[in-house]
Image (spheres, helix red, strand yellow):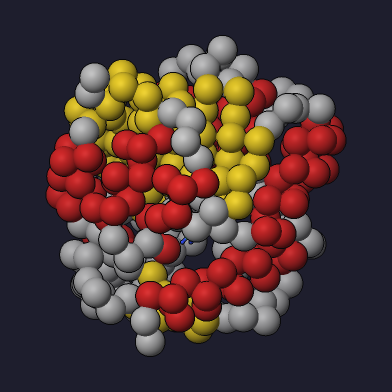
């Protein structure tokens, strides 16, 4: 298989996920659309890192169905979402329309963004299951720099690469590394009929994903022209990644005796150097 094959399997899977995520037990789009104050849980957390976005232009690559993107609009930003999935963008546009928010949603594959978007933004926001779909973190960081104004802010929050390298099928207490931590040419291939949200079943079940070490991500951003302001590793996650995890409110954590053993997510804040 080549990169085009990997990408088309992933696109078919993400197109399918829109139906599942907007169906039973999926994202609560009616609740989100009916309350102009309501933010996605993801943005409710990330706003403490990114600070005030009112009056700023903000772009969200890999925006999915727009709940995070439009949460930033509810906080006063002028938002643009980008994704390669046409049904995801249709859902995002419909949601913007229901909220009477003037948002722009652009269809583009991540690495094609420099051809599709020439504007530079005050804020670039991405993450929570974004870079694991991408084969080349150096090329990704160049796209992030392309989108950020000199002096502009960049923020991401992602699943931690140590977590993504763990064997997630063990029923015991051992945290065992079974997958690559560093970026590899050949992705991990998975076959899963369910998504992380929604009770419906996927038709296109095959996905291909890449891990990217924390140092690889940080160095790619520095080389692309960012100054790193903060990297913070978190003890919580927004999805059930390991059977040992316990639910605390709307998040998942490892049980107390494992809580300090591995980081589950990280936040990274950077500024594009002038
Ligand atoms: C987990 S979602 C991002 C999550 C977002 N935080 C949410 O849950 O609403 C990942 C997104 O990446 C998009 N994606 C995956 N591979 C892509 C690629 N190569 N180019 C552009 N978008 C891509 C998918 O369509 C999907 O919408």
Query: Which quarter of the figure has residue 258?
Result: bottom left
Q: In the rendered view, does 256 fall on the left or right side of 88?
A: left
Q: In the rendered view, does 232 fall on the left or right side of 199?
A: left
Q: Nearer the viewer, residue 153 or 108?
A: 108
Q: Is residue 41 visible?
A: no
Q: Residue at x 71, y 45 (%)?
A: 92
Q: Is residue 119 visible?
A: yes
Number of labelled discs?
A: 0
Establish if 146 lies above or below 158: above
The quadrant of the picture occupied by the C terminus is top left
Q: Residue at x 80, y 30 (%)?
A: 99
Establish if 252 lies above or below 155: below
Where residue 106 appears, as percent x and y from the top left, is 61, 45
Q: Residue at x 22, y 65 (%)?
A: 183
The quadrant of the picture occupied by the N terminus is bottom left
Where residue 24 appears, as percent x and y from the top left, is 79, 62
Q: Nearer the viewer, residue 146 or 99?
A: 146
Where residue 155 appears, as percent x and y from the top left, is 37, 33
């Amino acid at each position: 298989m080549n990169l085009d094959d990997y990408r088309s399997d992933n696109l078919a899977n993400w197109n399918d996920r829109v139906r599942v995520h907007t169906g039973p037990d999926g994202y609560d789009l009616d609740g989100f659309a009916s309350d102009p104050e309501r933010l996605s849980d993801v943005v409710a957390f990330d706003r403490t890192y990114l600070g005030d976005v009112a009056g700023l232009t903000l772009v969200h690559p890999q925006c999915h169905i727009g709940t995070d993107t439009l949460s930033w609009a509810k906080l006063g930003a002028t938002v643009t979402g980008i994704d390669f999935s046409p049904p995801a963008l249709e859902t995002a546009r419909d949601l913007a329309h229901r909220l009477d928010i003037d948002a722009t949603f652009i269809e583009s594959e991540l690495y094609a963004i420099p051809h599709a978007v020439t504007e530079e933004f005050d804020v670039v926001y991405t993450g929570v299951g974004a870079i694991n779909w991408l084969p080349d973190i150096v090329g990704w960081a160049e796209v992030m720099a392309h989108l950020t104004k000199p002096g502009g802010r960049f923020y991401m929050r992602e699943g931690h690469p140590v977590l993504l390298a763990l064997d997630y099928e063990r029923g015991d207490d051992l945290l065992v590394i079974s997958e690559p931590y560093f970026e590899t040419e050949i992705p991990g291939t998975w076959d899963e009929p369910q998504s992380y949200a929604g009770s419906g079943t996927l038709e296109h079940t095959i996905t291909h994903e890449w891990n990217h070490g924390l140092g690889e991500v940080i160095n790619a951003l520095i080389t692309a022209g960012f100054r790193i302001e903060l990297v913070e590793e978190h003890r919580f996650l927004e999805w059930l990644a390991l059977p040992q995890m316990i639910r605390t409110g709307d998040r998942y954590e490892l049980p107390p005796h494992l809580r300090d053993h591995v980081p589950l997510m990280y936040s990274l804040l950077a500024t594009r150097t002038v």
